[in-house]
Amino acid sequence: MLAENSGLNIRTIQRIEKGETVPRGDSLRRLAKAFDVSPEEFSDWTYEENNGYLISLNISALAGLLLPLLGILIPLIIWFQKKEKIQGVKELGSKVLNFQFTLSLLLFLSFIGQVVMMTNAFNTIQNSGDVSPSIVAGSIKYGLRFTLIVLLSLNAINITAILINTFRISKGKKAIYPAIPFIKP
């Protein structure tokens, strides 16, 4: 009866029932129509719940402490592997990635800010005609101090947000990441 109502062949229905395959695309739409539900509602029934995977996805962003690009690449890989199979991965992955993209953008803008400050400092030195080593060293030191403060602040924000959200996920709550929405779930 299900094969008849959905327009799928009986063998496909049997494979889905035995868990040998997961309905996707056209098969999912046909089954959803046969059950008179939306494909999104129907696919939620097939999602596996795995809180540990969500926590791993969340914590993987800490790799960005070693290299900012890793804070994006590792969660991206983990997100792509299970975003259609585990409940909540699609939403959490987009939140984590948006947060990491936002932090990376802020870090990049701070480097631009450092270049602007250093350029202004060197222009001031050049215009004053005084090229003493202490003035040049002071300009470089100020620029590096600014970058270090920004880098440490962004890392502190990253660690704090990841730890808070790991705790929230472990308690069954949704993660909250303030970020620019580059990726939508």
Image (cartoon, grey):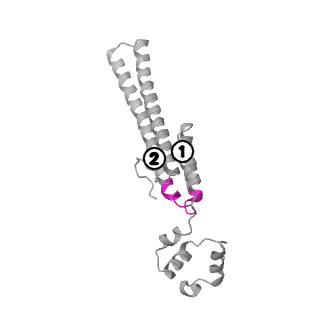
In the image, taking residue 70 as reference, residue 130 lies left or right, namely left
The residues tagged by marks 1 and 2 sit, at their Cα atoms, a distance apart of 9 Å
**How far across and how far down the image is residue 144, in percent?**
45, 25
**How far across and how far down the image is residue 6, in percent?**
54, 83
**How far across and how far down the image is residue 38, in percent?**
46, 74
Report the residue at 51% width, 72% height from top: 42
Q: Which amino acid does label 2 sit on?
A: Phe
Q: In this view, does 58 lie above or below 149?
A: below
Q: Which amino acid does label 1 sit on?
A: Ala
**How far across and how far down the image is residue 29, in percent?**
51, 76
Q: Indicate yes or no whether the magenta region holds residue 82.
A: yes
Q: Residue 99 carries which label?
A: 2
Report the residue at 50% width, 43% height from top: 162
Report the residue at 54% width, 37% height from top: 65
Query: Which portion, as a residue range, is magenta?
Result: 80-92
Q: Along the line of sight, which residue is nearer the eye, 132 or 22?
A: 22
> What residue is disc 1 on?
61
Figure quadrant of the N terminus: bottom right
